[in-house]
Each structure stands twice: as structure tokens, then as C-alpha cells.
Amino acid sequence: MRTCVSRGTGQGARSTGYCVAFALALVPATSFAQNGARFSDLKSFFTQSVAEEGIVGAGLYILGPNGVIDSAFVGFADRDAGRKTNGATIWHWASITKTFTAIAIMQLRDRGRLAIDDPILKYVPELSEVHNPFGPMSQVTLRQLLSHSAGFRSGTWPWGGDKPWHPFEPTRWSQLVAMIPYTEIEFPPGSKFQYSNPGYVFLGETIARLAGEDFEVYMQKNVLSPLGMTHSYYDITPYHLIGDRSNNYYVKDGKAVANGLDFDTGITTSNGGLNAPLSDMARYLQFLLGGQADGRAGGPYPLSRASLEEMWKPVVSTGSTAARKGSVGLGFFITDYPDGDQMIGHTGSQAAFRSLFWVHPKSQTAMIAVFNTATESEGADAKPRMGRLFTGINERFEAAVRCASSC
């Protein structure tokens, strides 16, 4: 399994990233009883590592199609206020937001409002001024944007900036439009993978223009509400939920410093603006697993099962080994194994929040974890060592769901 974390969703963590690759011995996948004992090693590693890495607060859910199999909550949602983490704690999900945006695009496709192979110029004609040395911008499609293969850069901003008056992200569409003539396609569209935050901003603009309303409004009505995600929202926290909001902490000189409860992702909301408790994210993962959401078997869901599974078909490779093939589909990262097994997932990284989820369709099991602490330096000795933590979680989840019954 290969995990890639982009640090380009926030101004303070613009264009760097890290990828974690590892190999496990492949064993036949079998059906198994969905119980917490199978995941005891994962849970123990999670709780111990959070303490060892100096993380202020974290949460973990392991789920089947009908609900939570096991969970773990460690530390504080807000250290100074003494609020501990729990299932109601509201976390920022950063780039995991992209999977919701991709689902909305597919939803509009299924309603006949667009085609996945339409050129993005059909919906965002301002992009005609992008410098494309490989051909006309009309060759850049929604499919390529969904699969991070359109050739756009990784970072939302093309430059740095850490002044107090700088916005966390561009706040208005006009700011991005002003940058378009100075934006370049970096490789032939569709030819390879390159993680791109701007690409998902353009998809969010497509959704808003087709819907005739703000992106956040469309998503609340057509994706979050059908899933029963009643405590989920984009950007600034509603007053009645502020008591559940997690703070986030950057470690500076060995000390965790609070960044504040809220920040505004501006015009980049479709790229990384979702906030939600794990209890709501459990509904989302149950939908991905094909189980129940809000107690209603089969929905109403925001997308049909056939369209969801279409999103899990590889579009472009992200790197392969003899043990597994990595790829990206339509909004989701995919790990395929030689025996036909598959994992589906995504990560998130913005401000000091870090998160990941994996879905194992064959066993109808999923895992989601989130942390509210990070270091501004990703050096080998800097704590928390998120690469080590993500690798350990990935290894243990993969071993549990792909393990033979004799394990």
C-alpha cells in the first residue's frame, strides 16, 4: 500500500509532501468475523504512538457496513480548555474533502448535467488563458482533474508568504482568475499523476456554476444531508457546535502551540474545507462500504453503487511494486493486489490536522484516523513523525483485513 500526503492544501503547508510505501507478505483474503479483536494490534499501536509522538489529540474508528467495530480516542480536542476527544469531536479533514467533491461531480453526471470527459473549459472558460505548451486547453477534461492527471501544479498559491495579513487560502475566485495567465500545464494532460489542489478548486467551481448556488450549499443539501451527516460543515464552525470543535497544534521547539479553532479555506473549500466528527464520518464510510446510513438500508444515498465503484477503477498509476499497484481513480487512491484484492482511500493534511482512511471492500471493513498535531518541519527526527505513524497504521489495517483465518 502506498500513502501520499499532500501538504499543499494550506498556505502554511504549501507544496511539499511525503509518500509512504511498504510491503507485506500477501496472504489470501478470507471472510472473517467483524470484531475488535482482529484489530487489537492496530488499536494498541495507535494509542501508544499518539503518546510517543507528542500528539495532543487523536481519534480512530474501525467500521463494518452496519456500524463501528472498535474505536479509540486519545488526548485532548482542546488542551487549554480541558476538552477530551470523543466521537462528537469535530475535526478538519483537509484533502479527504476531495472525495466528497468527486462524488458531487459524479452525482451531476448521473443527473445528466455533465459528462466526465467534458473539457473543463465548458464550465470554467477562464482557464483558456492557462499556458499549455502541450496543446489547447480544450484537451483538459473533468476526468483528468478528478484523477490528478491534468498537469496543474500541486500548491494552490504559486508562491510563499507568511505575513499576518496573508490569507490562509485565496478568499475570492477573482484572485485565482488573476493567477490563471501565469499558470502553466506541467506535462501532457492525462499522461501521468501529479497531485493538484487547484484542479479540485476548478471542480468545485464547476459544481457551483451548474448548481446555481455556492459549493457549500450544494454539498450540504445533496451529499451531507442524504448521508445523515448533521454535524458536518465547511469552514467556520456554527455557534451551536463550537463546543465540539478540535483545536490544532504545531510543534515548535518541542512544544505544541495552538493554532486556533477555526480557519477559512476561502475559495479552495472544495479542495479541503470539510469539518466533521468521526460519528458523521462513520456514516460516510458505511456508504462507501455499501452498508446503512442513518438507519436506512440502501440510502437515500448521494450516489448509486455502480457510480461509486466506477470511481474506484484506476485512471493513472501512482507507482507499483511486485506486491501491489498504486493508482488514482476518480477522486480516490487505489491499491490493487495480485490476487484481485483492493484497498480504497485518501489522506488529509492542512493546518496541523492529519488524517487518513482506507476501505477494504472485500471484507466490508474500513478504518479512519485523525490527529490534531503536526510539526512544521517534516525532518526524520521531528515529532510527531507522521510518516512513521501512517505507515504503522496502514501495515496493521492491511494485515488485519487481508490476514488468513489462522492469523
Image (tube, helix red, strand yellow):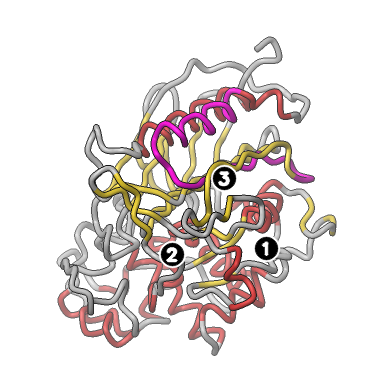
What range is drawn magenta here? Answer: 41-67
**Residue 221 visible at all:** yes
- Which quarter shows the N terminus? top left
3D distance between C-alphas at marks 2 and 3: 19 Å
3D distance between C-alphas at marks 1 and 3: 27 Å
Among the two numbered marks 1 and 3 on one chain, the one whose residue lies closer to the N terminus: 3
Tell me what residue is drawn at x 30 percent, y 42 percent. Answer: 18
- Which residue occupies the extreme right position in the image? 296
Query: What amino acid type is highlighted by mark number 2?
Result: Gly
Residue on which the image places disc 2: 272
The answer to whether 179 appears left or right of 99 in the picture is left
Front label number (1 vs 3): 3
Query: What amino acid type is highlighted by mark number 1?
Result: Leu
Tell me what residue is drawn at x 44 percent, y 61 percent. Answer: 146
Front label number (1 vs 2): 2
Indicate whether residue 341 is drawn in magenta: no
Badge 3 element: strand
Residue on which the image places disc 3: 59
- Which quarter shows the C terminus? top right
Q: Which mark is residue 303?
A: 1
Image coordinates of residue 217 in percent, x first then y, are: 58, 81
Query: What amino acid type is highlighted by mark number 3?
Result: Gly
Q: Which mark is residue 110?
A: none
Indicate whether residue 57 is drawn in magenta: yes
In this rendering, the answer to whether 316 lies above or below 23 is below
Image coordinates of residue 399 in percent, x first then y, are: 56, 23
Image coordinates of residue 150 in percent, x first then y, are: 32, 61
In this rendering, the answer to whether 53 lies above or below 170 is above
The answer to whether 13 appears left or right of 33 in the picture is left
Image coordinates of residue 90 in percent, x first then y, are: 57, 60
